[in-house]
Amino acid sequence: MGDMPFWKTKSLDEMTNAEWESLCDGCGLCCLNKLEDWDTGEIAWTSIRCTLLDGENCRCKDYDNRQATVPDCVQLTPKAVREISWLPPTCGYRLVAEGRDLYWWHPLVSGDPETVHAAGISVRGRTVAEDGIEIEDYEDYLVTWPLEVGLEPVE
């Protein structure tokens, strides 16, 4: 039996930058626009993706400079992961923060960055770019699939 993978032995705060970045499964769910009910705080997901998210490869087109282009882009940090309620239930950062394991399709488990797409978890082919969509029309794009959980994590 080999060594335990880093996400089972380290807290989010203890991870190197490379380990931290590798927790992202490449699903693109966090880059979908969300609506928040100001009275209840309830979050509603849309199929509208950030202008920088490539809808096919589910990666940011300008990751290193994203906050200059999209000032309200939320940068995930260990503290933010523990505080943000809208991270999808399949998010690697969220799972590790909650002491849970990664799903079988996570690239760190499968060894293949395509499994997140093959498992139907990612936003690939299911979104529209935000460019040209008026905020008043966002309700026309409400979806629930970002909250659907895939298969159970590996034990």
Image (cartoon, rainbow, N blue to C red):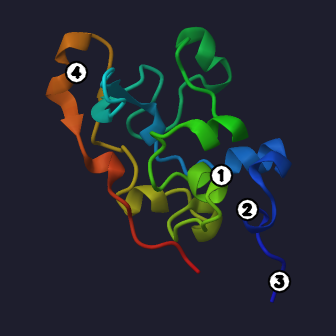
Q: Amino acid at mark 1?
A: Leu
Label 1 element class:
loop
Marks 1 and 3, the one that precedes in the sequence: 3
- Across and down, in percent, residue 35 comes to 32, 25
Mark 3 secondary-structure assignment: loop
The amino acid type found where label 4 is placed reads Tyr
Tell me the distance, in whole angstroms, between the alpha carbons under discs 1 and 2: 8 Å
Whole-angstrom CA distance, mark 4 to mark 1, is: 29 Å
Labelled disc at residue 2 = 3
How far is mark 4 from mark 2, CA to CA? 36 Å
Q: Secondary structure at mark 2?
A: helix
Q: Which residue is mark 4?
A: 138
Disc 2: which residue: 7
Question: Viewed as shown, does residue 34 lie left or right of 107?
Answer: left
Residue bearing mark 1: 23
Which element carries disc 4, helix, strand or loop? helix
Query: Could you classify mark 4 by the number of other residues whose Cα lies within 10 Å: few (under 14), some (14-19), or many (20 or more)?
Result: some
Q: Position of residue 114 (x, y in %)?
A: 49, 58
